[in-house]
Image: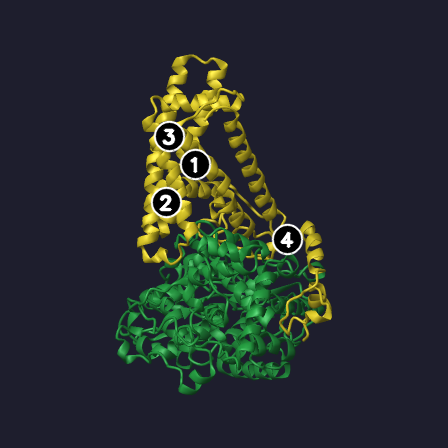
Chain colours: A yellow, B green
């Protein structure tokens, strides 16, 4: 396939991906303040995070200055993202496949970034020797990513199907997701193997994509790989795989959200408490048109 | 009988009378001697024919809730419709602003990696019974929400192959299953994504309570409702509470040879002590211990005799946001009326969780009175130099149980340890401990639930991991000849331990006694001529 098909196809998918992801993130951000539900260890507690302690260990904590540090938070997140430490520690048999799948994805993303850099090199007329080095790195990273990603995706598929701990919980969509990922990696291997110079082809394709060159071309295995990957990018925001973003919120907005009420929060809370309750349980007494405020303040808790 | 058969998620909605699992005591994880031979233990009480006739009994052979069977299909359908309405309300900002964000984050991002399973003491202790796996109830609930509470859910459920039917069998099983979890959140702690199956379970309980009016009677009618009406789920009315403590004051004054006096309703005191009334009835040494420590340290303190100011429990935290808010509000209103500077939360884990964190964003404006744990309060006193201590008085093996609601949920880990390391020469930790601890098995309200045969579940299954680690902590003195002290600074944990102790005969076989932290502090006071810990009366 050649010409503007690729531009339309890829840019529309990228646009939709960004819009849907933004919508999902905004939906989370716009949710109301919730009641506190923190869980130790809260890692921004500067001194105490090592053993799971919190500022509530301070005598008359409300009169003390809080000491926060984001270094342990960053170290924890880095350990999770780069090493899957939680899975390593608590679910060792899953780790090899989870790790290889995630690293497959990371390496493919890095290779895409390198293709983009190479495309910029081509446009800017960078010496061939420099481009060769980057293309070589991109080619190696790409194929390693495809291979280990395939191992991870296929391995997880088998684990889901063969291990009774997973099988009952694996719906069609769970397998579909892994099949899709495996398709990206395996099509990538085929494209890489069947191409004379995969990295160069990808770099040129990327350049043509960004320069809106009507001569943009990808055929055969490479075209199939690009199409599968692009469709996956569109599918991704509709799945639980968005945990690469939402994990930030499960940790920072819930597990580590240990902020006592403050003035700004109280303003929001007053609005929330003014809302009516519509639950039908007899003790809620929503038939009286009670709001949270009525229930908490006016009733004085008396039945 | 479904024992040992692989269980599917869709089994939750299968034919009503069919149990999903039968718990065989031989399949549970083994305990150290002398509890390794199940033959000498009580086993699991089976439901009587009459109970089987009257009560829903389609989960695991236990009944925590004594849910009566519906009279007819119309009644079943009514409950199913109510449940479906409740699913939708859980996703509405107005109805569920309290937990909407945490709930949706947990519902939408689980990747079913099962990392949480091996963290769950109930699942592990049961010999890995599928129904107790943290993701079993959570995944069913997630699929029901997706199918019945979201646009296009029914169509998508079929497409995704995640279709579970909502019928009477489903909701009656889910109701019981919601009370096979201790809400200890150990599973949540282990989740690499940050999904919280404990929260999902609590939201399920909340739906039943706030929409259908279904809750364990010990938590609701005889729990929060009774507490708000008469003062305490124990039924203890203010005048009776005062009488009881007056008697205890006299009794301890006589036995210890020092003046013990409980202060009631003192205006403008520095501290309102908020005990659990259950301690007054079942573990009075704890309440008296607080009085002795406060007086010795020269603290200006008081108890309240206003309903429910002498009862710190808040079962709402286990099952219902509305009741949680009502009870917490009453507590701080009483403190405000007395004009105290702060509330000190007594030895009760969920009281801590309710007042210190969960209700924090409900107690706004002039309801926001400072609230502090007894752990930090005691630590400040013990290391202030106001009281002289003689740690040799506590020279017996001591270990510490970490109440989940104080330790894992609030991060109060070290103050109690600093006290124990100072006052108890033979203090030793359990493995694991601190924020990695195991629940006592009574968490999530189970400690006070005793209907039908649920005590057997609490002792044989839910509390098994805790019992095992207690025995291991004292493995250097396994027999009854050396008296050992398990410090369990939480009323509900102590109530659960009492169930375990009665079931296994722990005191007689192993010589392990349990009590709170206050008792150990008072026992180590140098000026006290007689021992405060009286092994013969524990």
Please tell me if label 4 and label 2 are on a single chain. yes
Q: Earlier in the sequence, mark 2 or mark 1?
A: 2
Dot 1: chain letter? A
From the image, tell me which residue sits under label 3.
A221
Please tell me if label 1 and label 3 are on a single chain. yes
* Circles 2 and 3 in contact, beta carbons < 8 Å: no
Q: Position of residue B325 (x, y in %)?
A: 63, 66
Element under disc 3: helix
* Circles 1 and 3 in contact, beta carbons < 8 Å: no
From the image, tell me which residue sits under label 1.
A228
Nearest the viewer among B208 and A3 is A3
CA separation, marks 1 and 3? Answer: 11 Å
CA separation, marks 4 and 2? Answer: 34 Å
Q: Earlier in the sequence, mark 3 or mark 4?
A: 4
From the image, tell me which residue sits under label 2.
A98
From the image, tell me which residue sits under label 4.
A32
Element under disc 2: helix
Q: Nearer the viewer, mark 2 or mark 3?
A: 3
* Circles 2 and 1 in contact, beta carbons < 8 Å: no
CA separation, marks 1 and 4? Answer: 38 Å
Q: Earlier in the sequence, mark 4 or mark 2?
A: 4
Q: Is residue B155 left or right of residue B29?
A: right
Q: Quadrant of residue B59?
A: bottom left
Q: Residues within 10 Å of mark 3 (few under 14, many from 20)?
A: some
Element under disc 1: helix
Dot 4: chain letter? A
CA separation, marks 3 and 4? Answer: 48 Å
Q: Residues within 10 Å of mark 2 (few under 14, many from 20)?
A: many
CA separation, marks 2 and 3? Answer: 27 Å
Q: Nearer the viewer, mark 1 or mark 4?
A: 1
């Amino acid at each position: 396939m050649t010409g503007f098909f690729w531009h339309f196809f890829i840019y529309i998918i990228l646009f939709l991906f960004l819009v849907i992801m933004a919508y999902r993130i905004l939906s989370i951000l716009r949710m109301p303040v919730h009641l506190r539900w923190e869980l130790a260890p809260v890692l921004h507690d500067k001194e105490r995070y090592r053993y799971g302690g919190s500022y509530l260990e301070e005598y008359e904590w409300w009169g003390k200055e809080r000491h926060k540090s984001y270094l342990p938070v960053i170290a924890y997140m880095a350990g999770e993202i780069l090493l899957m430490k939680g899975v390593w520690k608590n679910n060792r048999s899953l780790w090899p496949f989870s790790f290889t799948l995630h690293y497959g994805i990371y390496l493919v993303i890095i290779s895409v970034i390198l293709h983009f850099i190479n495309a910029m090199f081509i446009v800017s007329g960078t010496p061939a020797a420099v481009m060769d080095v980057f293309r070589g790195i991109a080619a190696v990273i790409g194929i390693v990513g495809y291979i280990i990603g395939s191992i991870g995706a296929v391995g997880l598929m088998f684990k889901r199907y063969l291990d009774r701990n997973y099988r009952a919980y694996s719906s069609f969509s769970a397998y579909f997701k892994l099949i899709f990922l495996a398709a990206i990696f395996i099509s990538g291997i085929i494209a890489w193997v069947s191409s004379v110079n995969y990295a160069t082809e990808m770099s040129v394709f990327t350049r043509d994509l960004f320069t809106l060159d009507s001569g943009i071309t990808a055929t055969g295995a490479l075209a199939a790989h690009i199409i599968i990957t692009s469709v996956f990018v569109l599918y991704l925001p509709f799945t639980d795989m968005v945990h690469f973003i939402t994990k930030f919120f499960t940790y920072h907005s819930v597990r580590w959200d240990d902020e006592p009420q403050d003035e700004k929060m109280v303003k929001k809370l007053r609005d929330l408490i003014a809302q009516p309750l519509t639950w039908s349980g007899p003790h809620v007494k929503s038939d009286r048109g009670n709001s949270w405020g009525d229930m908490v303040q006016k009733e004085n808790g008396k039945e | 009988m479904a024992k040992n058969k692989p269980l599917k998620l869709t089994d939750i909605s299968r034919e009503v009378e069919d149990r999903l699992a039968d718990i065989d005591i031989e399949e549970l994880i083994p305990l150290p001697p002398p509890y390794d031979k199940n033959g000498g233990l009580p086993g699991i009480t089976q439901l009587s024919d009459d109970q089987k006739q009257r009560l829903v009994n389609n989960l695991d052979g236990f009944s925590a809730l004594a849910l009566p069977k519906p009279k007819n299909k119309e009644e079943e359908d009514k409950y199913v419709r109510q449940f479906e309405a409740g699913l939708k309300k859980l996703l509405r900002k107005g109805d569920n602003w309290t937990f909407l964000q945490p709930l949706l984050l947990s519902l939408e991002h689980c990747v079913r990696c099962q990392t949480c399973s091996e963290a769950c003491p109930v699942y592990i202790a049961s010999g890995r019974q599928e129904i107790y796996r943290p993701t079993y109830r959570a995944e069913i609930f997630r699929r029901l929400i997706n199918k019945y509470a979201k646009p296009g859910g029914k169509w998508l459920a079929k497409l995704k192959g995640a279709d579970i039917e909502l019928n009477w069998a489903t909701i009656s099983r889910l109701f019981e299953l919601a009370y096979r979890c201790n809400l200890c959140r150990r599973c949540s702690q282990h989740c690499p994504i940050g999904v919280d199956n404990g929260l999902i379970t609590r939201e399920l309980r909340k739906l039943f309570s706030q929409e259908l009016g279904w809750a364990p009677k010990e938590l609701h009618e005889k729990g929060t409702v009774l507490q708000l009406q008469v003062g305490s789920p124990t039924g203890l009315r203010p005048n009776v509470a005062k009488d009881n403590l007056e008697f205890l004051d006299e009794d301890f004054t006589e036995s210890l040879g020092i003046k013990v006096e409980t202060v009631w309703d003192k205006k403008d005191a520095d501290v309102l002590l908020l005990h659990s009334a259950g301690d007054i009835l079942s573990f009075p040494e704890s309440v008296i211990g607080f009085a002795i420590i406060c007086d010795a340290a020269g603290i200006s303190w008081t108890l309240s005799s206003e309903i429910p100011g002498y009862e710190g429990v808040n079962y709402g935290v286990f099952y219902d946001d509305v009741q949680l808010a009502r009870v917490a509000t009453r507590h701080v209103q009483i403190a405000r009326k007395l004009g105290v500077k702060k509330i000190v939360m007594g030895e009760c884990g969920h009281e801590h969780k309710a007042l210190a964190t969960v209700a924090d964003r409900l107690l706004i404006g002039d309801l926001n009175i400072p609230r502090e744990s007894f752990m930090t309060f005691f630590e400040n006193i013990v290391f202030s130099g106001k009281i002289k201590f003689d740690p040799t008085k506590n020279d017996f093996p001591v270990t510490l149980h970490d109440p989940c609601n104080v330790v894992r949920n609030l991060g109060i880990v070290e103050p109690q340890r600093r006290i124990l390391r100072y006052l108890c020469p033979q203090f030793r930790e359990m493995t694991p401990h601190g924020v990695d601890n195991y629940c006592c098995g009574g968490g999530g309200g189970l400690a006070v639930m005793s209907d039908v045969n649920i005590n057997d579940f609490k002792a044989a299954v839910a509390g098994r991991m805790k019992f095992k680690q207690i025995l291991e902590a004292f493995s250097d003195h396994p027999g009854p000849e050396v008296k050992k002290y398990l410090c369990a600074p939480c009323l509900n944990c102590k109530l659960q331990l009492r169930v375990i102790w009665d079931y296994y005969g722990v005191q007689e076989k192993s010589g392990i006694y349990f009590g709170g932290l206050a008792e150990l502090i008072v026992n180590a006071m140098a000026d006290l001529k007689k021992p405060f810990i009286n092994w013969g009366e524990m």
